[in-house]
């Protein structure tokens, strides 16, 4: 589309990359025994598959969304129809559409499975009648990122607003400070990629500059290049909401590892073994950053290696898909991934509309190349 700017193409690519990652892992989700995964799906999963009977998401069909994809679509519609992030509207949609269809048990609701943070929120909101803002729990997962990534895309050109909105949305269901910090950091990274900056060893320097300017709410006591503060120097005047900026430093370490010739993870799907297969955010983010940096120009390889690593491969594929999609843009995502995705025309249209609302980001990416 000639009237789509590079910024808008990257923005739409991030959204569709997340939807694709979610659907690709629907069938082979949560296999911790890799021999069992290969027995059921072969040596290499390269497309959408049906879930097996008796497993997670049983009864759904290849290309459909899990509940993570359902909630991402809900968030996307709220953003598009409101013209930006409206917490009241988001919460209303959660009450009226999602919470009305679940019962607080795991194997239930849209997508066939309800995650821990959403189950906890449902019990507090529906059974206990607590208001939004009082129902966040301690799940240490990436579930908030999996929806807030759409907010990050919407505000990719405004890091301060991105951080505020993504933190607020995360806190609705997860209130552990470390989880919130890592969630906001991922969203900040995604925003930078949508702007056109690279996921490389220099990205964390850019993020730290935003901390120093007060745009990202992370605490920092070091000087430039993480050097020690000078003797007698006062604490930074803009001490952030989060205890440290370490969540902003991780992406560049993973990116540096991905391009270092002396550090090889072969095949790349074994990143799940290196960083861990479980659901916790501290297992998921390093693997997603690594794959997105290693396959910066190859969406297919990034997302398929995420899927083939087993374990909580759905979260890994959503995150890697968003990062990879933001780097290559929607037009460079292989058509077969769009064609096989359930409701693809609707989702693409919504992603395009969100990208238009995000604007051209003053085409920040042009300045980085």
Image (spheres, rainbow, N blue to C red):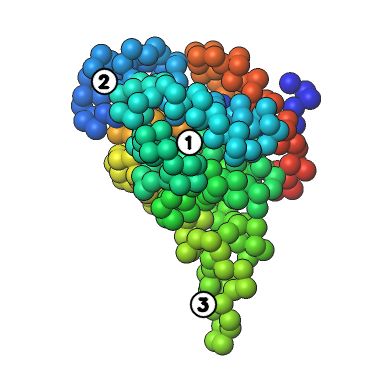
Query: Which residue sits at x=58%, y=59%?
Result: 217
Find residue 233 and report its horizontal and vertical position in percent.
Answer: 58, 83
> Who comes first in sequence, dot 1 or dot 3?
1
User: Regarding mark 2 in the picture, which secondary structure is present there?
Assistant: loop
> Who comes first in sequence, dot 2 or dot 1?
2
- The quarter of the picture where residue 215 lies is bottom right
Query: Which residue sits at x=79%, y=25%?
Result: 3
Q: Note whether residue 153 is visible.
A: no
Q: Residues within 10 Å of mark 3 (few under 14, many from 20)?
A: few
Find residue 139 and report its horizontal and vertical position in percent.
Answer: 36, 44
> Who comes first in sequence, dot 2 or dot 3?
2
- The quarter of the picture where residue 264 lies is top left
Find residue 82 and report its horizontal and vertical position in percent.
Answer: 68, 31
Query: Which residue sits at x=55%, y=38%?
Result: 149
Q: Which of the labelled discs sits on residue 55, or is there none?
A: 2
- Give the residue number, with chain letter if any, for mark 1: 146
């Amino acid at each position: 589309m000639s009237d789509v700017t590079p910024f808008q193409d990257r923005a739409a690519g991030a959204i569709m990359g997340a939807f694709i990652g979610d659907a690709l892992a629907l069938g082979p989700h949560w296999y911790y025994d890799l021999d069992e995964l290969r027995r059921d799906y072969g040596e290499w999963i390269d497309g959408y598959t049906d879930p097996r009977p008796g497993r997670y998401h049983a009864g759904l069909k290849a290309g459909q969304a899990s509940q993570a994809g359902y909630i991402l679509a809900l968030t996307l519609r709220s953003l598009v129809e409101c013209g930006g992030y409206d917490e009241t509207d988001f919460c209303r949609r959660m009450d009226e559409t999602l919470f009305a269809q679940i019962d607080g048990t795991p194997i239930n609701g849209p997508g066939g499975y309800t995650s821990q943070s959403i189950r906890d929120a449902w019990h507090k909101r529906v059974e206990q009648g607590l208001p939004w803002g009082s129902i966040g729990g301690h799940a240490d997962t990436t579930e908030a990122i999996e929806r807030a990534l759409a907010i990050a895309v919407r505000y990719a050109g405004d890091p301060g607003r991105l951080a505020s909105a993504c933190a607020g949305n995360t806190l609705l269901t997860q209130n552990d400070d470390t989880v919130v910090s890592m969630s906001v950091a991922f969203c900040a990274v995604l925003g930078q990629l949508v702007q056109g900056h690279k996921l490389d060893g220099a990205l964390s320097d850019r993020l730290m500059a935003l901390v120093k300017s007060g745009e990202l709410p992370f605490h920092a006591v070091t000087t430039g290049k993480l050097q020690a503060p000078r003797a007698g120097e006062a604490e930074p005047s803009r001490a952030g909401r989060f205890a440290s900026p370490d969540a902003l430093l991780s992406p560049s370490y993973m990116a540096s590892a991905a391009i270092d010739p002396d550090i090889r993870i072969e095949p790349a799907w074994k990143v799940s073994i290196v960083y861990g297969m479980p659901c916790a955010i501290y297992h998921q983010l390093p693997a997603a950053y690594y794959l997105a940096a290693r396959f910066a120009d190859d969406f297919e390889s990034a997302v398929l290696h995420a899927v083939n690593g087993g374990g909580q491969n759905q979260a890994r594929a959503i995150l890697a898909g968003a990062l990879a999609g933001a780097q290559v843009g929607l037009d460079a995502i292989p058509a077969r991934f769009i064609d096989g995705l359930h409701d693809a025309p609707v989702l693409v249209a919504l992603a395009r509309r969100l990208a238009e609302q995000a604007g051209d980001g003053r085409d920040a990416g042009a300045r980085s190349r």
